[in-house]
Image (cartoon, rainbow, N blue to C red):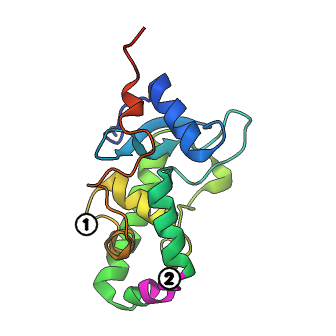
């Protein structure tokens, strides 16, 4: 098996993620999706944190504007409509496949028995957290997670438009 296609984070990227989260970033093993300006949007997180805590959310949405957009969708009661899409057999099959892909990606970074079979966002049968589903959709690319894709389409946020408070901060500064 090969690892998902993302780079090991730099110190500047970890600093941006920590700023985005308002706390120190933990267990980041990769930058899984980026803003149009290059800043992290989604991080890949170790399935077991340094303190030993199991952490099932492998793809973690960090971009403040993206997380706000998913929070707005949840507050606006979009989840039941998105969950209703699972009544379509093809969508349900694709969602189950997204769950399996998520688990396979995370397994490349370690086996954690306490979270075996648990992905994120309610997959494979429910819609529970749009933040997690959008994070997976952004990391995996269009067409992998149908509910994450649908949430992104319905949101006011776009990965093609920078809304960062400090655009390009993850590139670091070469100024002395």
- Decide which of 38, 51 is in the foreground and name it: 38
Is residue 102 inside the magenta stretch?
A: no
Image check: 14 left or right of 4?
right
Task: Tell me the CA gap for discs 2 and 1.
Answer: 19 Å
Q: Is residue 74 above or below residue 7?
A: below
- Residue 143, disc: 1
Residue 27 shows up from this direction:
yes
The residue that label 2 is drawn on is 79
Image check: 46 left or right of 159?
right
Magenta span: chief secondary structure: helix
Density class for disc 1 (Cα within 10 Å; few <14, some 14-19, many ≥20) is few
- Residue 15, disc: none
Which residue: 37% across, 81% down? 92
Counting the numbered discs, the total is 2
In the picture, which quadrant includes the N terminus? top left
Which residue: 28% across, 56% down? 141
Please tell me in which quadrant of the rendered image residue 81 appears: bottom left
The percent position of residue 134, horizontal first and vertical second, equals 42, 63
The percent position of residue 100, horizontal first and vertical second, equals 42, 62
Q: Magenta residues, as a range?
A: 76-83
Is residue 78 inside the magenta stretch?
A: yes
- Decide which of 65, 113 is in the foreground and name it: 65
Secondary structure beneath label 2: helix
The percent position of residue 65, horizontal first and vertical second, equals 46, 57
């Amino acid at each position: 098996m090969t690892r998902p296609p993302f780079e090991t984070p730099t110190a500047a990227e970890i600093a941006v993620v920590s700023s985005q989260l308002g706390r120190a970033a933990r267990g980041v093993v990769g930058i899984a999706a980026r803003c149009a300006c290059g800043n992290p949007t989604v991080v890949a997180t170790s399935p077991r944190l340094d303190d030993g805590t199991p952490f099932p959310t492998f793809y973690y949405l960090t971009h403040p504007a993206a997380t706000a957009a998913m929070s707005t969708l949840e507050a606006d009661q979009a989840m039941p409509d998105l969950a209703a899409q699972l009544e379509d057999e093809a969508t349900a099959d694709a969602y189950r496949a997204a769950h399996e892909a998520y688990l396979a990606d995370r397994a490349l970074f370690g086996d954690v028995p306490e979270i075996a079979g648990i992905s994120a966002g309610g997959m494979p049968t429910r819609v529970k957290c749009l933040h997690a589903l959008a994070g997976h959709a952004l990391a995996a690319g269009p067409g992998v997670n149908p509910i994450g894709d649908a949430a992104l389409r319905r949101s006011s946020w776009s990965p093609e438009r920078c809304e960062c408070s400090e655009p390009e901060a993850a590139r670091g500064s070469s100024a002395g």
